[in-house]
Amino acid sequence: MQIFPVSTMAGKRIDRGGGFVGAKKRSDRWLWGLGLLGLLMYFVFSWQDLFAAQEWKALSREEVVEKAKANWQEAGIELEGYRINAVMESEPSLDGYLGKEDLRSEFENQAPATAPSVYWHVTFYAGEMSSGDTRYETYHDLVSGQVFRHIRPDTDDGKEIGETEALQLAQSALSKLGIDRTRLSLLTDEELMLEEVGDWELNSFHFVWEDHQYAVGESRLYYSVNVTDGNVSAVTSYYEVPEAFEQWQSKQTLFASILTGFSMLGSFLMLVIAFVFLFLLQQKRPHWTTLWLSLLVMVLYAASNINQWPIIEAQGLAEGGVLGVLIVGAFAIVAVVFVSILVGAGNYPLTMTGAMLVREVKPSLWLSRKDPEWGERLRLAAKRGYLLAFAWMGFQGLFYFIGERYFGVWYENDLSMSPANMWVPALFPLMAWFAGISEEIVYRLFGVTFLKRYLKYSFVATLLPAMIWALGHSLYPIYPIYTRFIELTIFGVIIGYCYLHYGLETVIFAHVIFDTVLMCIPLFLSGEAVQVASGIGFLILPLLVGYGFSLIKPKREQLDFA
């Protein structure tokens, strides 16, 4: 993972992969040691986080949908023909507050089972515009599948009732969900600070209780029940966190957005420079290699984003029922197609210019398919990729172990990127291939090579692209917001040195494997046969790709290189 210049010595053949052929075994012994040590460090420092993950003990999407159907059937409601959306959700503000104040253990001890912070949200909705916004929603405990919230549309077959009777219906609805009413205190309208009585429909009542036994920091737990025309239309629970935390979090998010903007600007400048140098460099151009890599990046990006359809659908439902799904879905599809083409097109000049610069800086950074050592290089790249990925995992585990214990680093659960919320969870690790190929081309093949051409010091050549790359990850919910910048800048410099020492193929494999391992862990923890099989397949896929391509015989007559 480092750049150590390749020198020549009389009487010895040079290994274009980054060392003398006679020294390969000696070099790889170090990699084996680092890889195994890194894997051990990762599990030592991260095992608590692994087994605290929600996915390993959660019901599958299919199981929770069946429980949702049974819930409505018990209420005498058949939902045949309705479309179904099921996503895993959390209380992000609460999770952030608990993480910042180190209150997660206290929350787990105090929070009632009837108000989990992570849950399944299942929505049945009519698929036709003519049916209006008809939705039946249930919220389920991850493990038991117990319903703790439900929302249904208002009906026209109700009756006019008074506040006392409505309160009795609301209390009965709480009891049916297993909520301990002895913990609750009914709030008055003054305490709720309702805006206008006219905001509520005629013969509609809204009751809110506070759980007076819940006391975790300054957060609060409330239960809400709506009764309309003699029917309970919604029973919900929600947490409130201090306003000061919400303001702090908003500032952090704004700061992260600004840093991400700087990353986008830096990446765009790199693209402009690559495009200009594409015409200035007078060399043979690797058209075919660049074309298939760009198409591959485009397809992987599109597939990874389309796989997030359940989240897109849920956002549409939140915006406005079936109409919202149609509008948000159409916009998302158009955006995915447009951005995929843009990403593929942008990858083209970066790949081609970087490939040409490699010839001037250090030809061994990316071998031609015509090179007699090309097959051996790919086999070595796949093997070394696993070892480097394990070493990087150890570095990351150590970084966050130190950060959480000594520097106040904490995180929020980001379920939007959970395989549980993917259209096909088994394809979640496809994202690793997109990130590994595209980012190594942009920030290492082009970024590091371009700077190395003009700068004497390798450290600077690896540092600047690493900083741009790191800034692009600022919106990850890890706090303080500069944590990921520090982590990935260090990490990016290490990857840059690996690129200069081992070449592009190795760091692509290492990056892909690093992301794949982390993305396959929730697949294994799910316990589902299909997801476990998919995880195994994705873990060995880099080895199959590396060894498979190495079997392709070089075409001497080919003027291009791969």
Image: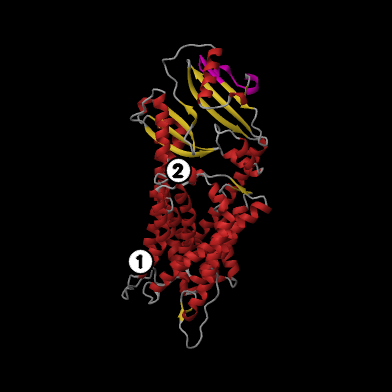
The reply, left or right, for residue 361 in relation to residue 156 is right
Q: Which residue is mark 1?
A: 548
Which element is circle 1 on? helix
Residue 2 colored magenta? no
Report the residue marked by disc 2: 421
Magenta span includes 195:
yes
Where 543 falls versus 402 (above or below)? below
Image x and y of residue 79, in percent:
36, 28
Q: Which image quadrant is residue 403 in?
A: bottom right
- Name the disc covering residue 390, or none: none
Q: Is residue 395 left or right of residue 325?
A: right
Amino acid, disc 1: Gly
Q: Is 531 rendered above or below residue 468? A: above
The Cα atoms of the two marked residues, 1 and 2, are separated by 32 Å
Residue at point 37%, 65% (across, down): 289
- Please tell me which of labels 1 and 2 falls first in the chain: 2
Image quadrant for the C terminus?
Answer: bottom left
Q: Nearer the viewer, residue 261 or 43?
A: 43
Q: Residue at the location (33% across, 30% down)?
A: 81
Instruction: Residue type at mark 2: give it.
Output: Asn
The colouring scheme, among rainbow, by chain, secondary structure or one colour, is secondary structure
318 relative to 547, above or below: above
**Who's the residue at 43% across and 45% down the image?**
422
From the top left corner, tell me how far across and down residue 398 is, in percent.
Answer: 61, 58
How far from the left and from the top, in percent, is residue 514? Answer: 49, 59
Q: Write the start and end of the magenta stretch as one range.
A: 189-206
Give coordinates of residue 218: x percent, y percent.
67, 35
